[in-house]
């Protein structure tokens, strides 16, 4: 990956999207699980899962001297983490064990992000009514 980054191949960015989707799933699920283990409310746990996942991606991009991908493109990132962490909260209400709900949440987030990447889905962009581009 260092060689590819040094040569600025387009394949570098595409190759990093898939491990990033896995990391998004793992960090969102584990962040929410830690918050639930600390007796936080469901909404706090979901927000902590999303913030944990997003901040990991932001730190990665800053270390690589890049503008964080969550800020420069319109592919769903936080939305996938937000939707998937709800599984972590709701599945135990239906009698599913904590470890299974953790894995299900991580897989759901990763799957949602992967589907979005595969299909090229993008969230709507904010359009300013000002003509000066600010």
Image: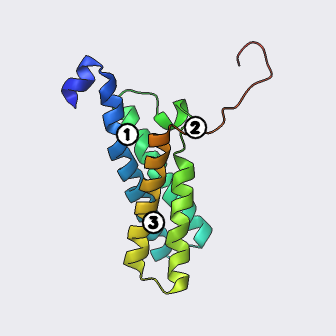
N-terminal-most mark, 1 or 3: 1
Q: What element does badge 1 sit on?
A: helix
Q: In which quadrant of the rendered image does the C terminus lie?
A: top right
The image shows residue 128, relative to residue 17, as above or below, that is: above
The residue at the point 40 percent across, 40 percent down is: 59
In the visual, does 95 lie left or right of 42? left
Give the quarter of the image for residue 14. Answer: top left
Distance between mark 1 and mark 3 Cα atoms: 19 Å
Q: Residue furthest front?
A: 119
Query: How far from the left and from the top, in percent, is residue 105?
Result: 45, 66
**Pointer 3: what residue?**
105
The structure residue drawn at horizontal position 42% and vertical position 83%, both measured from the top left corner, is 97
How far separated are the C-alphas under marks 2 and 1? 14 Å
Q: Which residue is mark 1?
A: 17
Which element carries disc 3, helix, strand or loop? helix
**Residue located beneath label 2 in the image:** 122
Q: Earlier in the sequence, mark 3 or mark 2?
A: 3
Mark 1 in CB contact with mark 3 (< 8 angstroms): no
């Amino acid at each position: 990956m260092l060689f590819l980054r040094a040569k600025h191949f387009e394949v570098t960015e595409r190759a990093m999207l898939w491990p990033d989707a896995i990391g998004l799933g793992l960090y969102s699920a584990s962040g929410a699980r830690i918050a639930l283990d600390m007796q936080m409310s469901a909404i706090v746990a979901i927000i902590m899962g999303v913030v944990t996942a997003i901040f990991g991606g932001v730190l990665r991009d800053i270390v690589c001297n890049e503008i964080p991908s969550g800020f420069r493109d319109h592919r769903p990132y936080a939305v996938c983490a937000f939707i998937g962490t709800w599984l972590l909260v709701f599945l135990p209400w239906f009698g599913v064990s904590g470890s299974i709900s953790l894995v299900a949440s991580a897989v759901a987030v990763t799957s949602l992000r992967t589907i979005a990447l595969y299909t090229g889905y993008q969230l709507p962009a904010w359009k300013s009514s000002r003509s000066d581009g600010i």
